Amino acid sequence: MHAAPRSLALVGLGAVGRRLAQRWQRAGIAVHAWAPSVPSRDRARAEGVSVAEDLASALTPAQAVVLCVGVAELAEAAESVARALPPLSADREPACLHTSGSLGPGVLAPLARLGCPTGTLHPLAAFAPDGAGPRLDGTWCAISGDERARAAASSLVAALGARTLLLDERETAPATYHAAAALLSNGTVALASLAFELAGHACRDREDARLAFQALLRATVDNLETRTPERALTGPVSRGDAATVRAHLGGLAGDPQTRALYLALSRRMLVLAERDGRLDAHSVHELERLLAP
Ligand SMILES: NC(=O)c1ccc[n+]([C@@H]2O[C@H](COP(=O)([O-])OP(=O)(O)OC[C@H]3O[C@@H](n4cnc5c(N)ncnc54)[C@H](OP(=O)(O)O)[C@@H]3O)[C@@H](O)[C@H]2O)c1
């Protein structure tokens, strides 16, 4: 493991930038942060982040640069950093990283052209705009890029107390990885909200229904902590119980969107149950017919 850079320029002081700056400062790294708007800089200063007067001052001492900027503004931010970066020398070639999960290092091309190692460091965590931000110790950060950028990224991840998840080199890898993260994290929230609503309609007390279904969600996540999805799966599809699945579909007849979602997820459940060798050929055939799109 390489030593973390002693001096870091951090560009972008939104939900992610402010929290990463704080954690890296706590780890003993000299952070020089900057964002275009005065309110963002003032807010970060008030939260204890060391903010530079301008972009060039943030970049001058930097051994690494991290751009915590939204996807739509990232290319423009990379151009600004490339313009403001002091000339590189043999002993000063700062690794430049960005925190967007869906993009590869290619968006940092203006910095690569100057000779900077380029890569990505995506914290696999949810940063709400307010509050202290997520715990990062024990979480993972996906990284990619050339060898020197990956070395810098891994050392910065370690300084957060997080673990490194190395992305594949294929160009499509970041979008695929990020779709998986969105499906799991954001998709679970969407699915939970739908289930809470359905249960609320079927129970006398909506709040009790929400609490009961939250407990079910926790138990399901607990099962996934210790078992593969194939082993963690429970419910009628896993038992080959076509009659219950038919009853569920009848109950959802007036709600075509939820019914379509139920069918799509149940087809995946069938794959898991088959992989686990739980179902006989007759049950599989019956469920396949019932769950056909
Ligand atoms: N939120 C999450 O949970 C999360 C998790 C992992 C990764 N990410 C990724 O991290 C990145 C930042 O996310 P965020 O939630 O922190 O976004 P955000 O709250 O919208 O903050 C974006 C920051 O970028 C700055 N910025 C905009 N245009 C710029 C430019 N041309 N040059 C320099 N700085 C510029 C903004 O400055 P001003 O404030 O001055 O306008 C702002 O401080 C995104 O790529 C996001 O996909 C987000």
Image (cartoon, helix red, strand yellow):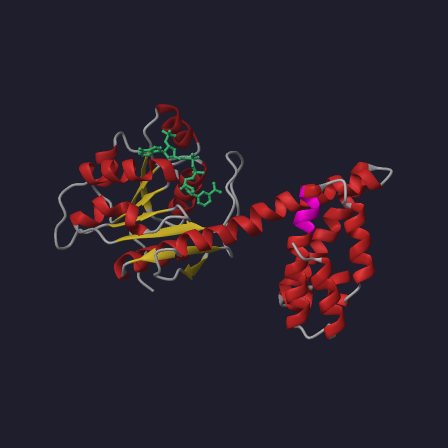
- Position of 200 compared to 158: left or right? right
Percent of width and height locating residue 32: 30, 39
Percent of width and height locating residue 125: 50, 48
Quadrant showing the C terminus: bottom right
- Can the viewer see residue 234 in this picture? no
Query: What residue sits 32% from the left and 29% below the top?
Result: 36
- Position of 263 compared to 182: left or right? right
Percent of width and height locating residue 109: 24, 47
| Image quadrant where residue 76 sits | top left
Magenta region, main secondary structure: helix
Quadrant showing the N terminus: bottom left
Percent of width and height locating residue 90: 12, 55
Q: Is-magenta flag for residue 117?
A: no
For this rendering, which residue is in front, 147 or 257?
257
Query: What residue sits 72% from the left and 74% below the top?
Result: 281
Query: What residue sits 64% from the left and 72% below the top?
Result: 275
Query: What residue sits 87% from the left and 38% below the top?
Result: 204
For this rendering, which residue is in front, 125 or 61?
125
For this rendering, which residue is in front, 43 or 87?
87
Residue bounds of the magenta highlight:
257-262
Q: Residue furthest top?
A: 38
In the displayed structure, would residue 274 be above or below residue 9?
below
- Split into quadrants, the picture shows ligand 1 in the one at top left
- Can the viewer see residue 268 in this picture? yes
For this rendering, which residue is in front, 107 or 83?
107
- Position of 230 compared to 280: left or right? left
**Count of numbered circles on the image:** 0
